[in-house]
Image (spheres, rainbow, N blue to C red):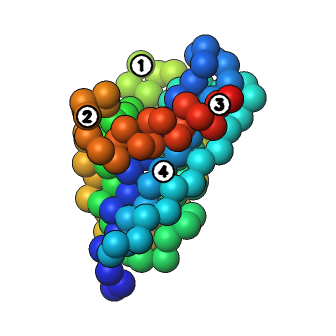
Amino acid sequence: MGKKITIYTDGACSGNPGKGGWAAVIIEDKNEKTISGSEQLTTNNRMELSAVINALREVASAELDIYTDSKYVKNGIESWIKNWKINGWMTAAKQPVKNKDLWLELDTLVSEKAIGWKWVKGHSNDHYNTIVDEAARKAIS
């Protein structure tokens, strides 16, 4: 395995649904790379997922720590997705899983990686969470 990489991600939306932005900071050794993007009509949860997906597309390393302020992303990939697959992509409430397309892509991207999923409280003065929050919001404009 290569060196461990740390990734911070965030998504933002102006209106929900509305115009959205996502961002990630990829930290490897002392190198930092910020990526971001936007969509015209989306939701905050789609932007949170997009941030992680786009960051994972950028890294070759199989050993990562991913920090997100989205419990939706963290709980979804660590826990809920197992039952969604078993239940034919239906939630416990027997409703279709929202954002299935992004969950499928994320599931594929994480399948060959050792990822430590970390939740960080948003807007709590965490240095990198603040950076990705600002970058996601800037991507909206």
Residue drawn at x 24%, y 30% as measured from the top left: 124
Q: Name the N-terminal-most of marks 3 and 1.
A: 1
Q: Are marks 3 and 4 in contact (CB under 8 Å)?
A: no
Q: Is residue 97 above or below residue 108?
A: above
Q: Residues within 10 Å of mark 1 (few under 14, many from 20)?
A: few
Location of mark 4 (residue): 24
Q: Name the N-terminal-most of marks 1 and 4.
A: 4
* Residue 127 rendering spot, x and y as whole percentages: 29, 44
Q: Nearer the viewer, mark 1 or mark 4?
A: 4
Q: Name the N-terminal-most of marks 3 and 4.
A: 4
* Residue 34 rendering spot, x and y as whole percentages: 51, 56
Location of mark 1 (residue): 93
Q: Is residue 19 left or right of residue 25?
A: right
Location of mark 2 (residue): 125
Q: Are marks 3 and 2 in contact (CB under 8 Å)?
A: no
Q: Are marks 1 and 4 in contact (CB under 8 Å)?
A: no
Q: Is residue 56 above or below residue 94?
A: below
Q: CA distance from mark 4 to mark 2?
A: 16 Å
Q: Are marks 3 and 1 in contact (CB under 8 Å)?
A: no
Q: Name the N-terminal-most of marks 3 and 2.
A: 2
Q: Is residue 85 left or right of residue 6?
A: right
Q: Residues within 10 Å of mark 4 (few under 14, many from 20)?
A: many
Q: Is residue 97 left or right of residue 112?
A: right
Label 2 SS:
loop
Image quadrant containing the N terminus: bottom left
* Residue 136 rendering spot, x and y as whole percentages: 54, 37
